[in-house]
């Protein structure tokens, strides 16, 4: 299949004969021969019973939702607007092993990036897609990544045989059929082709042949034999990989980042982006009390004049629901328990009400979830005890459901970024918050050195420490060395680049206890906001700048009405030299062994930090408390 070519007269005649007159009229209105060719190719290969070309009308939007319900892909819940969808027991997360770039023989991607030879991959995709839509509808949808009418915007088409997927897309992205119609000459749109494959009891039956291929040569993504939205809503993490390549060509950045407005003193608002691996507090940070949210997952960043500006690629949330409760995530919890369009996935449904892990409510002992009929203590087909809901159960809704939505979501110019935050799941090494000495130090020592313990967002064992540069390792589609150089370069000519910070919400004490509570994030954010404006000073340590006790004490008092003790400060901000040295050794060896062309600054920054940590160790021992550095200023 050549998804990049242009339809001929014959193709148009075929389409006229095989589409309904309304669908053909909608296709013709687009006047885009590349779109027509794509539809023709997928029709010939997958042989659907019908094709539905979807425009931006309210009528189509509600038809999609109705069809998802009629086909049994979603079930209506008691609360108006709420539905639930179930994925198969073995289809509960992003399938990293089977998500591959299709790389032509002459191209290079680092070996840490999952890939296969392009021709072979295309052949496999075609084989698996052949006849996959017999008896089903083929739904064709048009969206924009980024705000409509923005310089950042990338148009995208997704074809799917799942109304649930088509419905999810609707809540997550900006509809752009009209936008396509206005620019018939555009051929640079991203393409996604998805089929659930053969269904048994409503779920993808052939998950062993689950394949997700990214053909960056033709800006096309294939997703086959899967339903889990992280694998099938192609405009999310799959098109994002195409965007990383486009960003590389065009000199901007596509990042796995939230965008949020942190509110400082005297009505000041400072925008931050933040990258954290899935399941490490990214959404909950962007939803923190007192701040406003622009987006929780994907951002495009560009240098515009003397600023770095960013937009949210999406307009909705596909969030992890575990742990969302009235106390910890009150605004999401409110949206999830009040009327309004919401799709729950892989939660437990009991008498029309959804329940999930750690939802803070009295939970029923039975109901329906992703195993089918569930009761407490039951074991699943793999012999493991089945929790009340999947650990990666999710909710999907449009951001407009949230009371803390920032006014800039649809601003075509994006927002000006004051700070960039990286956070991972690390139980024993890094302090809760630190600031880089400068942009280069931050890119290398914080972004490129990020590691995290694995979570339920991807299939496989949880809790394994892995390198996750920029929290983007799963999605990086260009050589990593080049990706890092792009980060170093983006601020060229900017006299005051955004500050870079690292956070760790998961640091534990000697007895394994967490040293911080969830709400402490608020303090780190306020501290970072004030640092961006140089309102307060900070203490220089070998790994970056850390807060002064007095500033944190004041912030804990004012913001949380909490007494912050010197003892807590000392435990949290002790510089754990043996662990930090090991971390640098791991990061160094990851780059040495896996990455060609890492920029020289990478090894310089790591080596300097290593030397400095060793120097301090000889004077102050393995675990110097923060005050040691204050005194030595
Ligand atoms: C997500 C993910 O769903 O990263 O955002 O898995
Ligand atoms: Mn994500």
Image (spheres, helix red, strand yellow):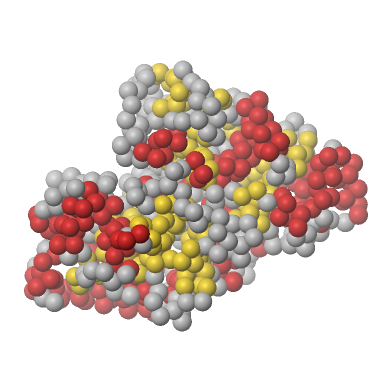
- In the image: residue 538, left or right of residue 257: left
Q: Residue at x 33, y 55 (%)?
A: 424
**Residue 248 shows in the view:** yes
Q: Residue at x 82, y 51 (%)?
A: 29
Q: Residue at x 37, y 19 (%)?
A: 364
Q: Position of residue 217 (x, y in %)?
A: 66, 63
Q: Is residue 581 above or below residue 410?
A: below
Q: Is residue 266 above or below residue 606?
A: above
Q: Position of residue 428 (x, y in %)?
A: 22, 54
- In the image: residue 93, left or right of residue 327: right
Q: Residue at x 88, y 50 (%)?
A: 12
Closer to us: 370 or 631:
631
Closer to us: 466 or 346:
346
Closer to us: 214 or 188:
188
Count of numbered circles in the view: 0
Q: Is residue 489 above or below residue 113?
A: below
Q: Position of residue 115 (x, y in %)?
A: 55, 58
């Amino acid at each position: 299949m050549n998804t990049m070519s242009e339809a001929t007269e014959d193709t148009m005649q075929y389409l006229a004969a095989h589409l309904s007159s309304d669908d053909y009229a909608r296709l013709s209105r687009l006047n885009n021969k590349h779109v027509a060719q794509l539809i023709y190719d997928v029709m010939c290969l997958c042989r659907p019973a019908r094709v539905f070309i979807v425009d931006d009308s309210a009528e189509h939007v509600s038809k999609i939702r109705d069809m998802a319900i009629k086909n049994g892909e979603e079930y209506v819940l008691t609360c108006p607007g709420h539905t639930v969808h179930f994925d198969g027991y073995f289809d509960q997360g992003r399938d990293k092993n089977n998500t591959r770039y299709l790389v032509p023989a002459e191209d290079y991607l680092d070996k840490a990036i999952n890939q296969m030879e392009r021709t072979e991959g295309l052949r496999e995709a075609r084989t698996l897609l052949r006849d996959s839509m017999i008896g089903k509808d083929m739904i064709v949808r048009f969206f924009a990544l980024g705000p409509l009418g923005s310089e950042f915007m990338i148009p995208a088409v997704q074809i799917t045989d799942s109304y649930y997927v088509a419905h999810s897309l609707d809540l997550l992205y900006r509809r752009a059929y009209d936008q396509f119609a206005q620019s018939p000459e555009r051929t640079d749109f991203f393409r996604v082709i998805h089929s659930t494959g053969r269904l048994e009891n409503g779920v993808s039956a052939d998950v062993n042949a689950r394949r997700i291929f990214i053909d960056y040569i033709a800006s096309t993504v294939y997703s086959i034999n899967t339903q889990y939205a992280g694998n099938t809503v192609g405009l999310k993490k799959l098109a994002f990989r195409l965007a990383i390549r486009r960003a590389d060509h065009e000199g901007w950045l596509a990042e796995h980042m939230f965008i949020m407005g942190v509110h400082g003193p005297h009505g000041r608002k400072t925008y931050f982006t933040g990258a954290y691996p899935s399941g490490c507090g990214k959404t909950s940070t962007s939803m923190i009390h007192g701040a406003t949210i622009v987006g929780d997952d994907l951002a495009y960043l560009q240098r515009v004049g003397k600023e770095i500006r960013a937009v949210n690629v999406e307009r909705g949330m596909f969030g992890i629901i575990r742990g969302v409760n009235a106390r910890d995530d009150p605004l999401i919890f409110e949206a999830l328990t009040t009327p309004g369009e919401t799709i729950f996935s892989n939660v437990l449904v009991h008498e029309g009400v959804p329940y999930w892990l750690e939802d803070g409510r009295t939970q029923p002992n039975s109901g329906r979830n992703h195993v089918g009929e569930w009761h407490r203590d039951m074991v699943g087909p793999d012999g493991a005890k089945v929790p009340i809901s999947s650990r990666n159960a999710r909710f999907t809704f449009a951001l407009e459901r949230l009371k803390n939505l920032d006014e800039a979501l649809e601003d075509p110019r994006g927002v000006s970024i004051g700070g960039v935050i990286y956070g991972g799941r690390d139980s024993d090494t890094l302090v809760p918050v630190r600031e880089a000495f400068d942009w280069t130090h931050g890119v290398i020592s914080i972004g490129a050195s990020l590691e995290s313990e694995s979570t339920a967002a991807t299939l496989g064992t949880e809790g394994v420490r892995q390198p996750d540069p920029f929290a983007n390792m799963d999605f990086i589609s260009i050589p990593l060395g080049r990706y890092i150089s792009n980060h170093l370069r983006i601020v060229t000519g900017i006299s005051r680049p955004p500050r870079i910070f690292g956070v760790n919400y998961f640091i534990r004490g000697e007895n394994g206890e967490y040293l911080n509570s969830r709400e402490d994030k608020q303090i780190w954010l306020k501290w970072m906001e004030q640092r961006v404006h140089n309102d307060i000073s900070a203490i220089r340590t070998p790994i970056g700048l850390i807060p002064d006790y007095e500033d944190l004490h004041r912030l804990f008092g004012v913001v949380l009405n909490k007494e912050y003790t010197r003892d807590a400060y000392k435990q949290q901000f002790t510089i754990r030299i043996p662990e930090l040295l090991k971390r640098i050794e791991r990061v160094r060896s990851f780059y040495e062994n896996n990455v060609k062309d890492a920029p020289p600054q990478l090894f310089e920054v790591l080596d300097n930090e290593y030397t400095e940590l060793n120097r301090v160790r000889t004077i102050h021992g393995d675990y110097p408390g923060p005050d040691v550095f204050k005194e030595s200023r």
